[in-house]
Image: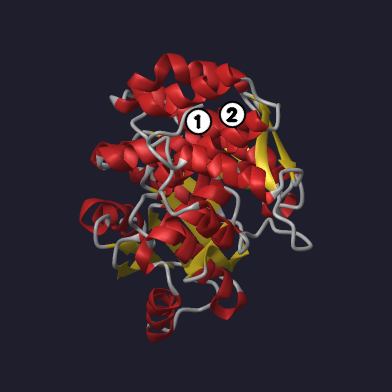
Amino acid sequence: MQNLIQTLNVALDERAYPIHIGCGVLSMPALILPHIKHKKAVVVTNTTVAPLYLELLRSTLENTGISTLPVILPDGEQYKTWQTLNLIFDALLSAHCERSTTLIALGGGVIGDMGGFAAACYQRGMPFIQVPTTLLSLVDSSVGGKTAINHPLGKNMVGAFYQPKLVLADISTLDTLPDRELKAGLAEVIKYGLIRDPEFFVWLEANIEKLLARDKDALIYAVHRSCTNKAEVVVADERENGERALLNLGHTFGHAIETGLGYGEWLHGEAIAAGTLIAAELSRQLGWLPVEAVLRIERLFIRAGLPVFGAPLGAARYLELMRHDKKVQDGKLRLVLLKEIGQAVMSDVADESQISAAIEARCTQTGKV
């Protein structure tokens, strides 16, 4: 299976685009060339990914006559800022890049988000290709067109919806991914099982160790199934007016952890794992989710090597940070909660005392389900 190329289509009418998934697709010019209309591309990457994959991508492109301009950014969530974004604009302007120049984001979620936002803004929009190199970006952030940078008061608060022309998902890039980053990506994989795909959750319970061991067939299956789920949701609700918001299970709490501790202290997936358990606990307190289901979720995250307790910021600080969440509507905090494993809902029924109780239960090492 690992030698096969699997292709999904994100069916957004005239803005539809393919996701090519497989091992070695970064070396296959036939997959990328149809999506570069002019003979110039800018490759935005970072100091960690550039030594690993920049030359491979450049040779794939330049051997077919496409010139490339690398833009190498510092690595880390703490650099997802206006200042770093301007480094991309500086390079584009200095090289006299035109609106027809293609921008390629080669890296994880931070590079994909910043590269996509830069592409959305430069001359009001330039072609954009995602080449994700982390598990988290392969299964989530590279698909669906959400781009953004962080603000000191909130994560991903400044951005745009801007779809790529292509997602090139090379599973081989996971060979060089640090174990901590691989585990963090599993949080977003598990999310799909929790919100809409209970059969996938059962598969993950049976195969999580294979994923941790980087079994290629298991990784391809998990990436393909995750991207299938993501593509279906994006096609149904591109601008996050309804169902797409369910993809944010655990994110409101998790973003509070990331912002409260300082960007980069916890990896995104680590914060999402802990945030998901807070959401599950609140769902239990509301009488929706049985204790056994919460324990089942907790066991899978533990087996994945992810945190199941949040940072001890205190409930008041969590609530303060969560009020900046994009899902706040008419001043009321709406949360993604679980009715059961495989069924998520957006709800504003929980009051602050109930939310605080769930936070306190899951944000100390003595917290009990």
How far is the residue under mark 1 from the one under mark 2? 6 Å
What x and y, as percent, mark residue 195? 63, 32
What label does residue 53 carry, if any?
A: none
Q: Residue at x 36, y 51 (%)?
A: 266
Which quadrant holds residue 309?
Answer: top left
Q: How many marks?
A: 2
Residue occupying the far right of the picture: 330
Q: Amino acid at mark 2?
A: Leu
Q: Looking at the image, which is closer to me, 332 or 317?
A: 317
Q: Secondary structure at mark 1?
A: helix
Q: Looking at the image, which is closer to me, 350 or 169?
A: 350
Residue occupying the far left of the picture: 51
List the residue tagged with mark 2. Answer: 194
Q: Amino acid at mark 1?
A: Ile
Q: Residue at x 63, y 40 (%)?
A: 231
Which quadrant holds residue 180?
Answer: top left
Vertical arrangement, residue 136 with respect to residue 33, above or below? above
Vertical arrangement, residue 142 with respect to residue 218, above or below? below
Left or right: 168 in relation to 306:
right
Q: Residue at x 37, y 49 (%)?
A: 267
Vertical arrangement, residue 295 with respect to residue 187, above or below? above
Q: Looking at the image, which is closer to me, 24 or 172?
A: 172
Q: Secondary structure at mark 2?
A: helix
Q: Residue at x 45, y 61 (%)?
A: 259
What x and y, as percent, mark residue 366? 40, 33
Which quadrant holds residue 93?
Answer: bottom left
What label does residue 190 carry, if any?
A: 1
Tell me the quarter of the image containing the N terminus. top left
Left or right: 346 in relation to 297:
right
Residue occupying the far top of the picture: 206
* CB under 8 Å between discs 1 and 2: yes
